Image (cartoon, rainbow, N blue to C red):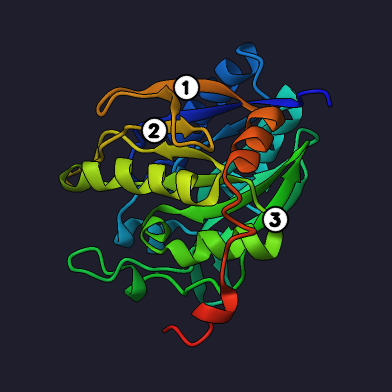
Amino acid sequence: MKDLLVKIAAAQIACTLGDPAANLEKMRAFAGRAQDAGAELVVFPEMSDTGYAMPVIRAQARPWSEGAVPALQEIARNLSLAIISGVSEKEGDAIYNSQVVINAAGAIIAKYRKAHLFSPAPIEEHKCFAPGCELGSVALGPFQIGLTICYDLRFPEIYRALAIERGVNLFVISSAWPFPRVEHLRVLATARAIENQSYVVLANRVGKDEGVPFCGSSAIIDPSGVIVAGASPEREELIVAEASSEVLKRVRARMAVFSDRRPDFYKDAP
């Protein structure tokens, strides 16, 4: 059977806090670089439109009929490039920490609202955002993409649910993960790839928002846990790699993790 390949880029960027116009110009430039590299999809970090600070997000979150999302749709359409990005979303009185999925024709084809909100002070996401209540996934060629955001990475249940219930075999993570926990980011992202025998595409922030430094280390990880493309902890970078249907098939054939599951044994577990 022919190996089906999808080239994916992860954009590791710094954002200008509270300046969506400047951030969109940067995203436009990185999307152009991704297109030049032959990517079919580029992934951007969490809250790439506003930057990551709760007071700024409260002030600047917009419905997707205006603001950053229509601009991202235009970028995708002009470049014939699919885009997944973390963005703010306002619906009625509620604000969500969301991911938008835009296809190469510029249409919104999927979305995800962050389910696990980071509660420790001083961030206290739960005081700004409403939690999402639905899994997010979308097809891309031979792959089924599962959508997650930052703190979700600490909850393996959502990744296994996406893999089992939605057939996900490639996870996309938009993140604004800080430096003190950089090793957690690396270990957890690799674990999610290994335990689900799936690709992981992690796009994390660099720079600082309100004094909080982000740790970069964006990565594209294959289903056996090998980092096939990785970024530095501190510089803006674009990383690009191919996801291979043959690699996915080979890893899953070697060790039948999903067939060997014991859901009857786990059903009463908390």
Q: Which amino acid, mark 3?
A: Gly
Name the residue at the top extreme. Answer: 36
Q: What residue does disc 3 label?
A: 167
* Left or right: 231, with 257 as reference point: left
Q: Secondary structure at mark 1?
A: strand
Label 2 Cα crowd, 10 Å radius (few <14 / some 14-19 / many 20+): many
| Callout 2 touching callout 1 (CB < 8 Å) | yes
Q: CA distance from mark 1 to mark 3?
A: 26 Å
Q: Residue at x 51, y 64 (%)?
A: 158
| Callout 3 touching callout 2 (CB < 8 Å) | no
In the depicted view, which residue is nearer to us: 137 or 56?
Answer: 137
* Left or right: 217, with 10 as reference point: left
Q: What residue does disc 1 label?
A: 239
- Relative to 157, residue 82 above or below: above
Q: Secondary structure at mark 2?
A: loop
Looking at the rendered image, the disc whose residue lies closer to the viewer, 3 or 2, is 3
Q: Which amino acid, mark 1?
A: Ile
Q: Which mark is residue 218?
A: 2
Q: Which amino acid, mark 2?
A: Ser
In the depicted view, which residue is nearer to us: 238 or 172?
Answer: 172
- Relative to 230, residue 105 above or below: below
